[in-house]
Image: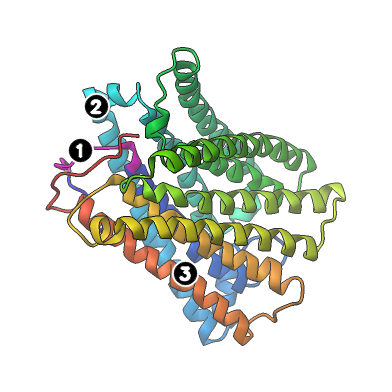
Amino acid sequence: MSHHPNTPRAPYSPLYFLATLGAGGLMVTFFMYLMFWVPHPGQPVPIFEDILAAFQTGGIPLKAAIIVAVTGIAGLAFLMIRSLIWNLSRLSQFRRTDAYTALRTSNAETQLMAIPLALAMVVNGGFIIGLVFVPGLWGVVELLFPLAMIAFIAIGAYGLMIMRDFFGRVMVKGGFDCAKNNSFAQVLPAFAFAMVGVGLAAPAAMSSLPVVVGLSFILSSFFIVVAILLAFANVILGLRSMMEHGATAESAPTLLVIVPLITVITIAWLRQSHGMHVHFDVHGGAGATFSMLTTLLMVQLAVLALGLTVLRGFGYVGTYITGDAKSAGSYALVCPGVALSVMLHFWLNKGLVASGLVDKFSLTYLAISAVAIGLQVAMIWLVLKLNAKHMGRDDSHVAVPAE
């Protein structure tokens, strides 16, 4: 889908792991078609057998949706893995440079959290690939849950070590430049831990064993709480610095990181809630879910309005997307579009439909779904545009946000 040069001429940044994240996130947007349009009795998610049965018995619109979804998932899985391999190769070279040493002693050290963020997305994406393409997977899924939790714990531990080094340095020796913290770049670690948390919450929604559900709830809660604490603190610090010094053009996309953070935490809460309902007699109800999803979606829209206002003020799209200037941080713009698309699917199906406000496949349902799909298509265009610009044959200088 895009060319990855063996020796790109552009300076490398860990933020390029956001390209891997973007491809993985777009896989999720295609999985939403299957999640909410393909009947899957007997388990909370559609599996290969459900998809095959729906394709054989469904109408033309459903068959078309399945073809598009399966094709999209396959193509984006390829792009995700290819991008991950490219990033890991470049990262090994980057670690031997002076630029890496400088990064480890600056505010930008937290950019390294893009690595566990992408790795967690790859594991989540791998589970989607298994559900869609592997026959009989559900028969051994209980054996896979412990392995998945071990993988997520390892990724989470890696992220905790990065943050241990960062906080160990700035809290003991100081040196954190608050004047240059005029963005939400420091919220990236919260996003990474939330991605680990949502992965750890998957067994809570899918396992039939109470002990696995309980362990999943406990482990995922730790990383979700860490994510919320980090996000809360760094949003306040970033806002204070921006109000005093103004934002910068290159870091402007970070203002939208709250949007995907909220979507990921929301999905984690929904997964936990399902497990609590099925195994521990905790009942929230469709109305409570609708209320939560609506409130969080409104927060996302408010954040989106602020972020787009700042991006417009800097002329960011004309400069860094369609213009000649390059910034690795541009990939951060993929995340909010993907996250809002996924959130709309959940709000529509788990909120509006489940509470009886909207009938499934009614005109209103199709209209809201169209908005979600429109965002998805726009983000596919953006990923391909950025990949061609940053990883194509004509690479030149890429501006790498230093803070």
Q: Which mark is residue 391?
A: none
In the image, residue 165 lies at what x, y percent?
Answer: 46, 20
Q: Secondary structure at mark 1?
A: loop
Work out whether 311 lies above or below 353: above
Left or right of residue 288, residue 259 in this image: left
Q: Which residue is mark 1?
A: 11
Would you say the residues marked 2 and 1 are in contact, meaning their CB atoms lie under 8 Å apart? Answer: yes
Give 71 or 107, whichever is nearer the viewer: 107
Indicate the amino acid at tag 2: Ala
Work out whether 358 lies above or below 321: below
Main structural element of the magenta stretch: helix, strand or loop? Answer: loop
Indicate the amino acid at tag 3: Ala
Left or right of residue 66, residue 362 in this image: right
- Tell me which numbered mark, 1 or 3, is placed earlier along the sequence: 1
Q: CA distance from mark 3 to mark 2?
A: 41 Å
Q: Does the segment drawn in magenta span residue 56?
A: no
Work out whether 342 lies above or below 365: above
Q: Which residue is mark 3?
A: 69
Q: Which mark is residue 99?
A: 2
Residue 194 seen in render: yes
Give 204 or 228, whichever is nearer the viewer: 228
Q: Residue at x 68, y 50 (%)?
A: 269
Q: Secondary structure at mark 3?
A: helix
Magenta part of the chain: 6-15
